[in-house]
Image (cartoon, helix red, strand yellow):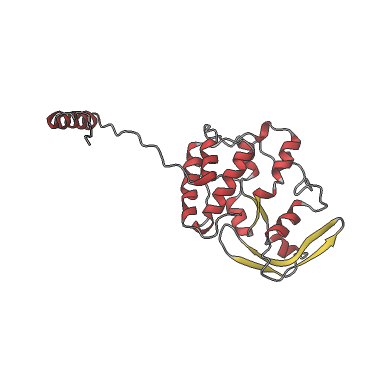
Amino acid sequence: MTRTEGRRAPQSLVWLLGVVLAVVAGGCGVVPPQRAPAAPGPVGEQLEALTVVPRPRDDGTYRRAAFGRAWADVDGNGCRQRADSLYRTADRSQPFTVRTSGSCTHEMTSGTWRDPYTGQSRTFTNLRAPRQAQALPVDHTVALAVFWRYGAKDWTDQQRLVAANDLDNLVPTSAEVNSSKGGLDAASWRPPKVGQCGYATRYVTIKHRYHLGVDTSEKAALRQMLATCTHAGDGSR
């Protein structure tokens, strides 16, 4: 059986073409542009789908009050969103207690929580005590100030209220981490490596859900953090 092949260019011509291209590229100091590798998986696809916008500046107009009452019961189950978040994320392998408070049937009074940013677990024996409650703040993965800068300042009050109380964006952490993160975005703050996969996954999911833009430095940082997911054993919530 005979196989037909296309005619090959003479070796001398191939060599000459390579020399010419090398001289042109080297002489002009031009390096062919290389696209950054896309982040893996569905979250990576969500990241690539985000609209790239110029990095917004802090114009000083953000106010927490623009997002409505803190921990409003937007899902109507009788519990404030802080209570829902703590109940949702408590370590069920460790002892915990809940109580009924008013119309809320699952207010946590003690338990253990794993900080998704640092991986450290902390146990609280009486969350009705102000000092213990203050040591377990619930953080917005995408800070409300970031929401504001990337478009939420043009939303309705109700849209901001719902976004501020989205349980998928809420995580319990420590006062120290919560303070250091503040209103910074993913380009300006990132957790230790153990928490980067989960942080970036939640961050991209929320930005995609609310159609928030992303600037180039933020996108690059999120790509880097999502790359740790191939090595992280904990994944994301």
Q: Which residue lies at the image location 63% right of the left edge and 45% below the top edge? A: 143
Q: In the image, residue 79 lies at what x, y percent?
A: 80, 53
Name the quarter where the C terminus is drawn.
Answer: bottom right
106 and 69: which is toward the camera: 106
The reply to whether residue 147 is visible in this rendering is yes
How many callouts does the rendering have?
0
Q: In the image, residue 40 lies at what x, y percent?
A: 48, 46
- Asked if 52 appears above or below 205 in the picture, the reply is above
- Asked if 86 appears above or below 147 in the picture, the reply is below
Q: In the rendered image, which quarter is residue 129 located in?
A: bottom right
The reply to whether residue 184 is visible in this rendering is no
- Tell me if 192 is positioned left or right of 22 in this view: right
- Tell me if 5 is positioned left or right of 168 in this view: left
Q: Which residue lies at the image location 67% right of the left edge and 59% below the top edge? A: 89
Q: Residue furthest left?
A: 12
Name the quarter where the N terminus is drawn.
Answer: top left
- Tell me if 48 is positioned left or right of 115 in this view: left
Q: In the rendered image, which quarter is residue 10 located in?
A: top left
- Asked if 180 appears above or below 123 in the picture, the reply is above
Q: Which residue lies at the image location 59% right of the left edge and 57% below the top edge? A: 177
Q: In the image, residue 236 lies at what x, y percent?
A: 58, 54
- Asked if 9 appears above or below 180 in the picture, the reply is above
